[in-house]
Image (cartoon, rainbow, N blue to C red):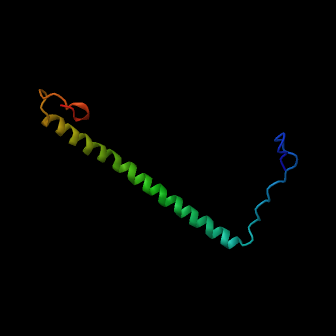
Amino acid sequence: MVDPASRAVLTSEAAPRPRPVEDLAAAARALREEEARREELFQRSLDAHRNNREILSRKFDELLKRAKDDDPTKPPPKPLGLE
């Protein structure tokens, strides 16, 4: 309980503890499912990391192609479309 005037805590109660596992088979099954989920997330992350180098290489090649096609004597466009 908190005193509204002084905003001091007068009394407190500890949060109830979660119940221990009642069914070991269900707990073991939940752990296996969680392990499978973590493994799947890891594999996704690993695949994304492996493909990252290829994707960055493609992006670089595309930007390099655009830079080569761009006319260096042409002035850059005016900001906000002002002429």
Placement of 56 over or under 44, stated as above or below: above
Give how far across and how far down residue 45 sits, in percent.
44, 52
Toward which corner of the image does residue 33 lie, by quadrant? Answer: bottom right
Give how far across and how far down residue 6 sits, in percent.
84, 39
Placement of 9 over or under 81, stated as above or below: below
The residue at the point 48 percent across, 60 percent down is: 40
- Quadrant showing the C terminus: top left
Give how far across and how far down residue 1 sits, in percent.
84, 50
Q: Is residue 33 left or right of residue 43?
A: right
In depth, the one of 72 and 51 nearer the eye is: 72
In depth, the one of 4 and 64 nearer the eye is: 4
Toward which corner of the image does residue 73 lie, by quadrant? Answer: top left
Counting every numbered tag in the picture gives 0
The residue at the point 67 percent across, 73 percent down is: 25
Q: Residue furthest right?
A: 10
Q: Is residue 41 left or right of residue 11?
A: left
Placement of 57 over or under 21, stated as above or below: above
Q: Is residue 80 left or right of residue 47?
A: left
The residue at the point 30 percent across, 43 percent down is: 56
The residue at the point 35 percent across, 47 percent down is: 52
